[in-house]
Image: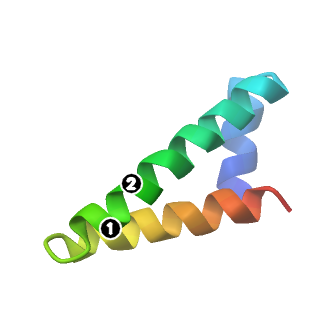
Amino acid sequence: RPSRKVFRACLQPDEATWIRGRGWALSWALIYVPYYRLTNPAGVEVAMRTISEVLADDQ
């Protein structure tokens, strides 16, 4: 996504930092989905989008 490229260009993180950030986002989202699936569908939607974006960022 263009906004992610701009964000990354502004931050200028090294590759290891970027990978750790992606790992943190993926970890948060994977824990969030099953815990809140019945009580917070809007939050689950955000978590699912996060998972999709993190995985797509790897391609």
Quarter residue 41 falls in: bottom left
Q: Secondary structure at mark 1?
A: helix
Q: Is residue 9 shown above or below 26?
A: above
Dot 1 and dot 2 residues touching (CB under 8 Å): yes
Location of the N terminus (image quadrant): bottom right
Q: Which residue is mark 1?
A: 34
Q: Is residue 1 left or right of residue 40?
A: right
> For residue 15, what is the image quadrant?
top right
* Image coordinates for residue 52, horizontal then vertical, percent: 61, 69
> Where does residue 8 sit, x and y in percent of width and height?
72, 36
Q: Given the image, on which type of amino acid does mark 1 rest?
A: Pro
**9 sits to left or right of 22:** right
Q: Residue furthest left?
A: 39
Residue on which the image places disc 2: 31
Q: Position of residue 54 (x, y in %)?
A: 65, 57
Seen in the picture, residue 48 relative to 20 is either above or below; the reply is below
Whether residue 53 is visible: yes
